[in-house]
Amino acid sequence: MTSRTHRDIFASEIDWLLTEAGARTFTLSTDEDNPAAPQMVLAHFPPGFSYSAHTHGCNYLEYVVAGQITVGKISYGPGDVRQVKAGGGYGPLKVGQEGCQVVIVFERGDTADVELLPRRKPVAA
């Protein structure tokens, strides 16, 4: 019996998940048998994409590969990195007119899920 020590995933082989909002994501764990293992998410956000303020239950890093994304009042472009601590709320997210591609690395896959945050200001009628 041979053990496999690495896995090659080529761009043409990625099985993208299309979200209801039109984003495409691909998630890969460093250890598929361990839910707590670090997790990488590749995300392609379409032009004008937006997402409500939210948080995650673990630390993570986000690297902007292409395009532009505004988080709250701060805009990020290619090469910019965001480092977020577990439970740190942020948002909303707003993507520029050229769309945006990011790589996100979560410290723990089992606590990476999105938790939406309540609105701080009431919506005007």
Image (cartoon, grey):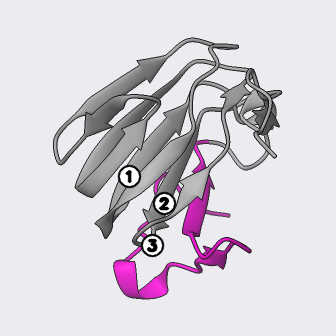
Q: Quick check: is 4 in the magenta stretch?
A: yes
Which amino acid type is marked by label 1? Answer: Val
Q: Residue at x 40, y 36 (%)?
A: 62
Query: Which residue is rendered at x = 69% and y = 26% of the image?
Result: 55
Segment colored magenta: 1-30
According to the picture, the residue beneath numbered tag 1 turns out to be 102
Q: Is residue 13 left or right of residue 109?
A: left
- The majority secondary structure of the magenta stretch comes to loop
Horizontal side, residue 115 vs residue 106: left or right: right
Task: Give the amino acid at mark 2.
Answer: Ala
SS class, disc 1: strand
Residue 70, horizontal then vertical, whole percent = 37, 41
Q: Residues within 10 Å of mark 1 (few under 14, many from 20)?
A: many
| Any part of residue 20 in sight | yes
Marks 1 and 2 close (CB-CB < 8 Å)? yes
Residue 7 seen in render: no
Residue 120 part of the magenta segment: no
Which circle, 2 or 3, is nearer the viewer? 3
Q: Earlier in the sequence, mark 1 or mark 2?
A: 2
- Secondary structure, mark 2, is strand
Q: From what the image shows, is residue 103 above or below residue 117?
A: below
Asked if residue 27 lies left or right of residue 49, the reply is right
Q: Amino acid at mark 3?
A: Pro
First reached walking from the N terminus: tag 3 or tag 1? 3
User: Looking at the picture, how far across and down is residue 95, in whole percent?
Assistant: 40, 56
Identify the mark at residue 43; answer none if there is no mark. Answer: 2
Marks 1 and 2, how far apart at CA: 5 Å
Question: Image quadrant of residue 120?
Answer: top right
Q: Position of residue 105 (x, y in %)?
A: 49, 36
Residue 4 is drawn in which quadrant? bottom right
The alpha-carbon separation of the residues under discs 2 and 3 comes to 10 Å
